[in-house]
Image: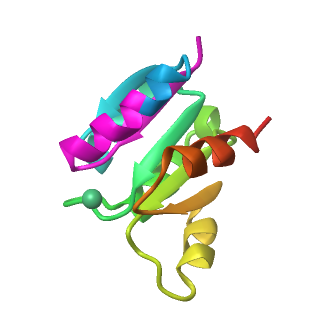
Amino acid sequence: MSLVLVTDDSASNREFLATIMEHEGWEVVEAGDGLEALAMAVERTPDLVLLDIQMPGADGYSTVAAMRQHPALAETPIFAITAYAMEGDPQKGLDAGFTGYLTKPLTRRRLLAAIGALS
Ligand SMILES: [Mg+2]
C-alpha cells in the first residue's frame, strides 16, 4: 500500500485530504506542522507528500526545502496545497522544491488529477 503524508495546521483540512486518499486506497499519516512533517517524512519515506504552505513555525516553503536535503526524499512527489493564489506564487513553489502546486479550495477531482498525472 502506498503511503501519503498529509500536512496542514488545520485539522479539518487534514481530515478532508485524508478521507479522499484513504478512499483511494492509500495509507495516510498526518502532521500538523512543518517540523513534525519533516521528522515523519524522514522516518517513513512516504510515496507522496501533501504540504500546506501557510503554517505556524516552519512554513511549507522551508519544509519542502529541508525535505529535499534528504536523499530519500529528493525525488518524492511533494505537492503544495495552499490558499495563496497570487501571480508568481506557483513559480516560487516550484523553485522551493515542490513537484506541483494546488490552490485551495481544493476539490477531490483536482487532487486526484494531479496525483494521477504522476504515473
Ligand atoms: Mg495552513
Furthest-right residue in this view: 119
Ligand 1 location (quadrant): bottom left
Please say which color scheme the image uses.
rainbow
* Image: magenta residue range: 1-19
Question: Quick check: can you spot residue 41?
Answer: no
Report how many numbered discs are placed on residues in the image.
0
Question: Taking 8 as reference, is 100 above or below it?
Answer: below
Relative placement, left or right, of 108 versus 91 is left
The residue sitting at 72% across, 39% down in the picture is 116
**Residue 113 % position (x, y):** 67, 46
Question: Taking 96 as reference, is 22 above or below it?
Answer: above
Question: Taking 106 as reference, is 83 above or below it?
Answer: below
- Quick one: 58 or 91, which is closer to the camera? 91
**Residue 89 % position (x, y):** 53, 79
Question: Quick check: can you spot residue 32?
Answer: yes
Furthest-bottom residue in this view: 87
**Residue 67 % position (x, y):** 50, 46
The residue sitting at 62% across, 31% down in the picture is 72
The residue sitting at 47% across, 44% down in the picture is 50
Relative placement, left or right, of 45 versus 51 is right
Relative placement, left or right, of 105 versus 113 is left
**Is residue 59 within the magenta segment?**
no
**Is residue 8 within the magenta segment?**
yes
- Quick one: 59 or 117, which is closer to the camera? 117
Question: Image quarter for residue 88?
Answer: bottom right
Question: Image quarter for residue 15?
Answer: top left
**Residue 78 % position (x, y):** 57, 47
Image quadrant where one finds the N terminus: top right
